């Protein structure tokens, strides 16, 4: 029997920066290389504030790959509004700096377009609530580009974490997760997006979404926690003196679900309240640690090899059980590695296509609620450390 041809999913790209280029490069990799047969992605429009940049982007990232005459040709626009009005687009990707996510996503949503918006999805939780309300009103799909969630490794780690059987490691007790990069901030111009508060600079909003995503994927989503948001958020921040953004940020989250009825195989006393802690760190001045995350559980530990946004390996270590020798010693371990073509931004694109075709307004895997938990944590940390955006940067500052 002939295999059905994949359906074409048509993207409009907002902005021509570094990330937009990387995303498009991944998007146009043949999906069969990652065993995806139902969708093929095409870029049909690119918009920049400067039409020359849009033209160059199409030449550099699109025309080199979409050569076939049957392909739709990508249109280059010199304004974002022109792209929002393009009838040939199934979804808009927003790759502007953090504080420009809100206006760009809002423009697309109000034009009736589905949206995939870079992380952090907005500058604060009020902006996010406003976008979610607009997306629902206009009946369009909206998702934060939390690409880590769609990595093949994450699915496997979660199986081991949520598994009550032989392979399982028991309930998570504490997660340590760190995503840091030495950007040498003192050498950057003060208007660079990584250090300029007008563009939402700082370690937490740029790098912090990843350690926090790991906390949400391993603890918030754990069956024993059942999506209860953290009951406590505590932070410690070192500022980048020249601009006042956060340079090193540590966040401790406590999750507790007193009504947990999930019973792991290691429980001998029946269902009991669930508690777990996440200790998360990001820095603009030091390189990534290895492993990038450690999930310590009742019966063992899962080490996530760095870098945690797109880890391609993990190691599971099991502790001695009762009567198996010295308590706490590792009795066995195994490592799994993952390989795929591209950097890994394309997995989330496949999810978007399937959700849109399925008529969904949000992804079941990374839905609005998870982005809201994330932005609420970031709001609270900024409140605790006194990171106040300059006047006018936040487009929404309270619940309407
Ligand atoms: N998922 C991931 O792995 C990564 C995600 N990101 C996210 O992507 C976003 C963009 O980051 P990155 O590509 O590094 O940034 P860049 O500065 O390289 O690109 C941002 C682009 O946004 C457009 N833009 C619109 N308004 C502004 C403005 N006021 N100031 C500057 N640029 C503006 C510009 O495009 P134009 O002139 O064409 O309109 C610019 O090229 C960030 O939110 C970041 O968090 C970044 C890196 C990795
Ligand atoms: O998401 C990201 O991951 C990689 C970093 O280089 C980048 O600054 C950040 O936005």
Image (tube, grey):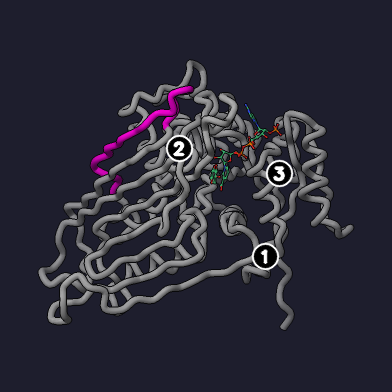
In this picture, which residue range is highlighted in magenta? 228-246
Direction right: furthest residue: 69
- Where is mark 3, residue-wise? 12
Q: Is residue 92 visible?
A: no
CA gap between label 1 and label 3 equals 18 Å
Of badges 2 and 3, the one in the foreground is: 2
Q: Which of the pair 253/324 is nearer the observer?
A: 324
**Residue 81 found in image quarter:** top right
Quadrant containing the N terminus in the rendered view: bottom right
Direction top: furthest residue: 391
Q: If you read the primary sequence from the N terminus, does the residue marked by circle 2 or circle 1 appear first?
A: 1
Q: Which of the pair 71/301 is nearer the observer?
A: 301
CA gap between label 2 and label 1 equals 33 Å
Q: Which of the pair 11/132 is nearer the observer?
A: 11
Q: Which mark is residue 203?
A: 2
Q: Position of residue 103 (x, y in %)?
A: 59, 29
The residue lying at 37 percent from left, 36 percent from top is 376
- The secondary element bearing badge 2 is classed as helix
């Amino acid at each position: 029997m002939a295999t059905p041809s994949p359906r074409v999913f048509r993207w409009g790209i907002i902005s021509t920066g570094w990330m937009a280029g990387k995303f498009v490069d991944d998007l146009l990799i043949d999906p069969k290389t990652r065993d995806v047969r139902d969708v093929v992605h095409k870029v049909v429009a690119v918009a920049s504030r400067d039409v020359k940049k849009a033209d160059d982007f199409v030449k550099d990232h699109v025309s080199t790959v979409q050569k076939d005459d049957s392909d739709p040709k990508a249109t280059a626009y010199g304004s974002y509004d022109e792209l929002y009005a393009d009838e040939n687009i199934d979804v808009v990707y927003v790759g502007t700096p953090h504080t420009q996510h809100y206006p760009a996503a809002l423009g697309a949503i109000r034009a009736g377009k589905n949206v995939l918006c870079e992380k952090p999805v907005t500058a604060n939780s009020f902006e996010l609530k406003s976008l979610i309300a607009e997306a629902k009103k206009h009946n369009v799909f909206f998702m934060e580009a939390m690409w880590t969630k769609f990595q093949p490794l994450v699915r496997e780690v979660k199986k081991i974490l949520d598994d009550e059987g032989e392979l399982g490691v028991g309930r998570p007790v504490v997660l340590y997760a760190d995503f840091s990069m030495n950007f040498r901030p003192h050498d950057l111009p003060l208007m660079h997006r990584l250090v300029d508060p007008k563009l939402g600079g700082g370690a937490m909003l740029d790098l912090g979404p990843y350690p926090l995503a790991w906390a949400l994927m391993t603890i918030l989503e754990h069956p024993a926690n059942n999506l209860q948001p953290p009951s406590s958020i505590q932070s410690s921040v070192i500022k980048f003196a020249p601009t006042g953004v956060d340079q090193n940020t540590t966040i401790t989250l406590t999750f507790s679900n007193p009504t947990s009825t999930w019973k792991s195989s290691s429980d001998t006393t029946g269902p009991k309240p669930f508690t777990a802690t996440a200790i998360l760190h990001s820095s603009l001045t030091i390189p990534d640690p290895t492993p990038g995350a450690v999930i310590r559980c009742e019966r063992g530990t899962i080490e996530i090899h760095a870098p945690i946004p797109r880890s391609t390996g993990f190691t599971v270590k099991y502790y001695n059980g009762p009567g198996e020798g010295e308590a706490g010693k590792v009795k066995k371990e195994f490592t799994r590695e993952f390989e795929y073509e591209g950097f890994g931004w394309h997995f989330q694109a496949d999810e978007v296509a399937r959700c849109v075709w399925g008529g969904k307004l949000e992804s079941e895997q990374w839905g609005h609620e998870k982005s809201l938990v994330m932005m609420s944590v970031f709001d609270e940390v900024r409140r605790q450390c006194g990171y106040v955006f300059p006047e006018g940067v936040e487009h929404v500052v309270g619940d309407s």
